[in-house]
Amino acid sequence: MGRIVVISSLAFLALAFLGIGLGMYFFLKRLVVNGKSVLDEPVNEQTRTDKMGLGELLVYLSMIALAGVFVVQIMSRGGTGNAILAKIVILPPIMALFNARKRTGKAMIALVVSFMVALFLMIAYGQIGLPPKAPELMIDDKPITLTQTSVSDLLKEGFDIYIRDNDSFSNDYDEALSSGKIKKYQANKSIFIEKGFHQDSNAVSYAPYLLGKDGLILGGIALYGDEIKETALEDCKIIQFKLDEDRIKAAKSKAISYKLNGIDLLTRIEEGTMRTTFGDKLWSVPPAHPVDSTQLWYGIQWKSPSDHLFWNEYFSLIRLDENYHMIDFELVGEVARDD
């Protein structure tokens, strides 16, 4: 329903702009001044008709480009009044270019149409945005992209999928494997994932699906198949990956590496490195003088203005100890869908 509302409102706006443009064209075409249609008559007081030089043109275009940068920043913040503010910013340099030479009604129509197209695109960008680039998780130098990497992709890379019995709990994975509480999936398409998008709120020690390699449980995962039908486990996409302190220690003991967009998650995680790598996607950092360890965490998000209505989105939470070493990690991919 949300997609229909956004698309319908943009379609209505496009039709309104089209109506304004056509209405202005036919009105000026019928309006006659000094025996000529206003479309062929000057509409400003400028008398210069010579061609604009390259240097002069670059000055005006640079002004428009600079205003355009501000407009993009304004529209990316969202808000109901931002389109009006964007118009106030972009209109003066455009009018300066228009009035730099003698212009006819046709030129004015072209300017108005161009402005409405630009305004429509800015509003559409403010409502829908562009798809964020998915973060890359590297496990033992093997890339995993949430919402894109499938279970079958992981199996081909030498990973294993383990399935936990319902309601069983265990941090002793060797015992759980030997007792059958956790079983290695045989990749025979015998298990299907229910339809719809479902994140896993369980701790790793309760996670129903686990990722492993060479007999070592690496972390908990959540899977997504389809919105309207059940999907074989092999064909599902990875939408969530979790680590707890126990699995982090196990990975270190086996020299398993974890990296997020190139940042080594198993070494001290510095704020400067995080800011350099993630920029404005880093929405939360530990305070300079934390009161206790509960304040030691990083929050990262890869979002668009439309949330997950049109594009996939991604979120990560990294909890730290007093030495700024990771003790808990979660990376989640929100599949684009109309809730």
Image (cartoon, rainbow, N blue to C red):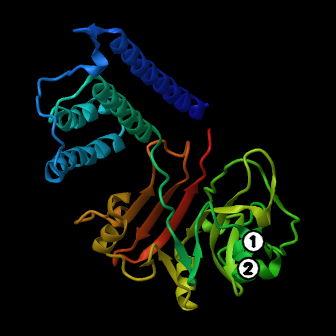
Look at the picture and state if 314 lies above or below 250.
above
Q: Quadrant of residue 191?
A: bottom right
> What kind of element bears circle 1?
helix
Look at the picture and state if 197 lies above or below 12.
below
Q: Position of residue 327 (x, y in %)?
A: 46, 73
Q: Quadrant of residue 96?
A: top left
Q: Is residue 270 left or right of residue 42?
A: right
Residue at mark 2: 156
Instruction: Give neighbour class at mark 2: few <14, some 14-19, many 20+ (Cα, 10 Å).
Output: few
What residue is drawn where x is 33% and y is 25%?
109
Q: Position of residue 193 (x, y in %)?
A: 78, 56
What residue is drawn where x is 44% and y is 77%?
262
Q: Is residue 165 visible?
A: no
In contact (CB < 8 Å): disc 2 and disc 1: yes
Q: Is residue 117 visible?
A: yes
In this view, the residue in front, 78 or 47, is 47
Look at the picture and state if 29 lies above or below 8.
above
What residue is drawn where x is 43% and y is 67%?
319
Residue at mark 1: 152
> What kind of element bears circle 2?
helix
Q: Position of residue 95 (x, y in %)?
A: 19, 32
